[in-house]
Amino acid sequence: MSPELRKRFFIILAVIAGCLASLYLSIGSSGIKITPINQRINLGLDLKGGMHLILRVQNDNLPTRQAKEDAVLKSMEVLRNRIDGLGVAETLLQRQGQNQILLQLPGVTDRDKALAMIGRMARLEFHLVDDDAGHLKDARSGHVPDGEVLTGMKESDGTRSQILLYKSVVMGGEDITDAHVDFDNNMKSEIKMKFNDKGAKQFGDLTNTHVEERLAIVLDQEVLSAPKIKEPILTGDCVITGNFTFEEASLLALSLRTGALPVPMTIEEERTIGPLLGKDSIDAGIKATIYGGIAIVVCMCLYYLVGGFIASVALAINLLMILGSMGLLNILMPDSQVTLTLPGIAGIILTLGMAVDANVLINERIREEIDNGRPLSASVNTGYSRAWSAILDSHVTSLIAAFFLFQFGSGPIKGFAITLSTGLIASLFSSIYVTRTFFNWLISEKIIKALPMAHLFKKPNFNFLNKKYICFFISGSIIIAGAIDFAHKKDTAFGIDFAGGQIQEFKFDHPISADGLRTLLKEGKVENAVIQTFPNAPENVIIRTQQDTNAKVVAIFKSQMPDNNFQVLRIEKVGPVVGQALRTKAVYAIVLALLGMLVYIGVRFKHFTFGAATVVAIFHDVLITLSLILLAGRQIDLLVVTAILTITGYSTNDAIIIYDRVRENVPKMRNKSLPDVINESINQTLGRTVMTTFMTTLSALSLYFFGGEVLNTFAFVLIRGFLFGTYSTVWVVSPLFLWFQGNKKW
């Protein structure tokens, strides 16, 4: 083995060892030890369960800019203290924009408890009670005395009574230093509070001045109790009694202990994932990865034989590099929040399919050189050198799409962008460096003396350009049909990510019918609910509503179907403000990705005519794909936009590879017209085009059948997009390019 080959193998082994070490080894005070892989790769909330919340601080009515700023910062401080009190680990609390807060609570699936803890203002006030019977009678008849308010109070027996309070706050809860749950003589939960010195003095003066009067304890404008002051309380201690459960008292004590929110907060976006759905998603993702990988490896080995086997080894190294890079980033930057999400698993599967693109291109180039009579070693070297520019350009355009996905996507979508980007970078190493090293080693050691490969097309000679009008008619018909369907559906064409609303997914012990469930919900006053069941999983049901109906729906299930137990798989809620913002970001992501590709292609090919034709064709792919989604009765959401941006990168890859061949053929075919050169170039690359479309579609089909229902629409979009992306590259880009080019030379 030559020194150069030894060096290359050493680098490959070092990369493999580094990836394995970043995934399994850790160095501590006790030395080197093996760490489970799940401790090195952070799982997103959609895989391990938890809550993802976008909270909006309602500071619009505050008088000054500084007051608004202080309200956001104080709200974050209070939230952090409350979360710490719950003992939730690995939480994420970040400010977003001017008045939004991102909160992630891994492992927290008790939705009601979490929302009660987060949303409670915990504004404690003390009001004196007007016990004059005449005043109370007048207030009940509608004549409330000035400076007073008539309100209700829950009694210990569960009934409600009316009580007349003075509006003025005689004392607030700002000086509370401790609040904890205790029990009275009847073993009922109560809350014991303690004030600091300042609060103790104020409370002592208050109780000393108003002995034998009633003092109402009001929390968030709700009267909890109104005991009579029998004697001055000078110790700074106070007890809140009420009809509390232990859980309610614990949350209330936590809220009082950590302080009040300065202004109310609203939940603009919520994604609660149950642990069962997370486990099912991991199982489905692993299954889709295994099946997709096996299908790709089998097809590559059957078609390219030795070349396919080498490409398969490179794919395994590619997968290891993706996981290893995530583990390494979490070691070097523990606060980076690099996580593996469900769309991220989809990104890995797609990366394997798209990495095949480079290997197919290399093998096709090598075969061309062999068919031209070159020696095997020269064929391999020339094949790699001629494939390099197209591989680089196609990877960069896909990275452009991934970059804008990361910039404008939410947490899971960012996970997809990260895995797609790392996979593409790893693909450059594995498909160029690794496979070439193996080829050179096998040839130098005379282990192989030939590289037989199957032929999909021997010498194709189709006239692709003369079918342009038929293709324009097909494309136009689909786009017009989609536009009509969109105009008919309007906002219902969008999922909750863009239109707002709530999704609830449940898994029952026994199958349930959509019609029966629809009847139950209507009887329970849950109107306009869209219900979806699954033939392959009849126990699962998804309910879409415009409002937060979870409490009503759960109550209906428990009362009307007591023998059919259920688990909450996920709850997702998006407010109209966030929905509009997400829709705007999606448009920005698509437009900026297209512009980025236009600039890159124009610079690389030194010809903006080709870039413009490619971008118009990609826009055509976007419209076709959206039309097919709508006509299939599916909704447009964030995962659909993610799939569309993936398609734009893939379609650009196809166009680049064909027009890289055109650029190569123009000097060789000076006696031919540009349409003939383009037609010849498409025929020369036809085998590669069909094979890569087939391989990437295999990975998408694996996602569609085995990736779970969450990724089903995502895979549906990819399959249609890959097929129409290939179609547009051959039959749309070329006519557009010739039209834009006119009589100018290329």
Image (tube, rainbow, N blue to C red):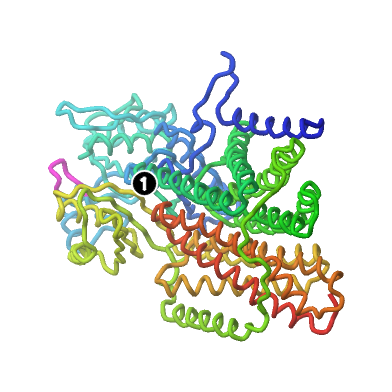
Q: Nearer the viewer, residue 62 or 686?
A: 686
Residue 226 location, x and y as percent? 23, 41
User: Which secondary structure is most common in the magenta stretch?
Assistant: loop
The question of residue 500 being in magenta is answered with no
Q: Position of residue 664 (x, y in %)?
A: 81, 65
Q: Residue at x 47, y 66 (%)?
A: 636
Task: Name the residue tied to disc 1.
Answer: 277
Residue drawn at x 30%, y 28% as measured from the top left:
233
Mark 1 neighbour density, 10 Å: few (under 14) some (14–19) many (20 or more) = many
Q: Residue 170: x and y, percent? A: 36, 42
Q: Quadrant of the C terminus?
A: bottom right
Q: Secondary structure at mark 1?
A: helix
Q: Is residue 170 above or below residue 484?
A: above
Indicate the quadrant containing the N terminus: top left, top right, bottom left or bottom right.
top right
Q: Is 74 on the left-hand or right-hand side of 736? A: left
Magenta region, residue range: 153-159
Query: Taking the image as drawn, is residue 272 in sight?
Result: yes
* Residue 437 in which image quadrant: top right
Q: Is residue 101 visible?
A: no
Q: In the rendered image, which quarter is residue 600 located in?
A: bottom right
| Position of 407 relative to 334 (above/below) | below
* Residue pictured at 26% horizontal, 42% vertical: 224
Q: Is residue 539 left or right of residue 61?
A: left
Residue type at mark 1: give it.
Leu
Q: Is residue 510 above or below residue 238?
A: below
Left or right: 733 with respect to 28? Answer: right
Task: Point out residue 641 in the picture as x, y percentages from the top left corner.
Answer: 53, 63
In the image shown, does 121 or 64 lie closer to the viewer? 121
Q: Which one is nearer the viewer's eye here, 520 or 549?
A: 520
Per the image, is 158 magenta?
yes
